[in-house]
Amino acid sequence: MQRPLSQLVYAPVQTGNGTPTIITLHRHDAFADEMRDFGMAMNPSGRVLGLQSGKGVYVGRDITGYTWFLGPLDQPSPIHFGDSLAEIERFLWDEIDRSSASEPELPFLVGDEQGAIMALAAAAAVPDLLSGVVAINGALPVVPGWEPPLAPLDGLPILLINPVPGDDTLTASFTGWGGVVTILNGESGQIPNSQIAEWISRQTPRKLRS
């Protein structure tokens, strides 16, 4: 019996043996289940897991949702950001350990807002554990002591949804690090689920390298 490395909980939104596997990362003050419709729309026939942060957002003694880090989106608290990124990496290793395949297929991360920031951070930190990343309203934060990339991206597919108009920093950074970046803008800021699903279907899921 093997104990999981990560303490994060997750919701099995859509089970089965279909590919690819999508792991969703929620926004600030939200729950894993709130990404359910996004995940299923983007991956109609594959496996979808909703990952939830371990840090609650409280009003009095009641938890109203969960957050990946404290602080503004572009400058998160280093300790909370680092803890969440480490937990996501551990969860990705747990997913590999749970696979019975000799060459496990790697998942896609789909994140919204704070979740998009964590998905992009994971792309820069552990690209060898991912098949691709979809970042909705995401950005690359400034975190003292953290200098991405931590590993070459080696052609990792990255889809940016509704990035800040006129800000080419995100695209330039990930392209310079070896990622393959695509940009989609939804009408009036909407999330173009069908186009995201089409993009995911065109990607070839990666296998874990020995």
Image (spheres, rainbow, N blue to C red):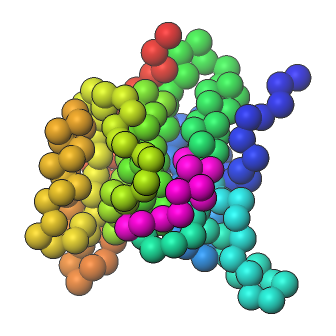
**What secondary structure characterizes most of the magenta part?**
helix
Q: Nearer the viewer, residue 74 or 5?
A: 74
Q: Which residues are magenta?
A: 74-85
- The residue that appears at 60% across and 76% down in the rendered structure is 29
- The residue that appears at 45% across and 22% down in the rendered structure is 207
Q: Nearer the viewer, residue 16 or 29?
A: 29
| Quadrant in the rendering for residue 1 | top right
Q: Tell me if residue 42 can be seen.
A: no
Q: Name the spot of residue 82 as percent of width and height, x first.
A: 56, 50
Q: Nearer the viewer, residue 44 or 175?
A: 175
- The residue that appears at 67% across and 20% down in the rendered structure is 100
Q: Name the spot of residue 114 as percent of width and height, x first.
A: 47, 66
Is 1 positioned to the left or the right of 33 in the image? right
Is 184 positioned to the left or the right of 6 in the image? left
Is residue 75 one of those drawn in magenta?
yes
Q: Name the spot of residue 31 as percent of width and height, x first.
A: 65, 70
- The residue that appears at 84% across and 84% down in the rendered structure is 61
| Quadrant in the rendering for residue 55 | bottom right
Q: Name the spot of residue 131 as percent of width and height, x first.
A: 40, 35
Q: Tell me if residue 17 can be seen.
A: yes
Return the residue found at the far bottom.
60
Return the residue found at the far right.
1
Is 158 positioned to the left or the right of 43 in the image? left
| Quadrant in the rendering for residue 148 | top left
Return the residue found at the far front.
145
* Number of dots carrying numbers: 0
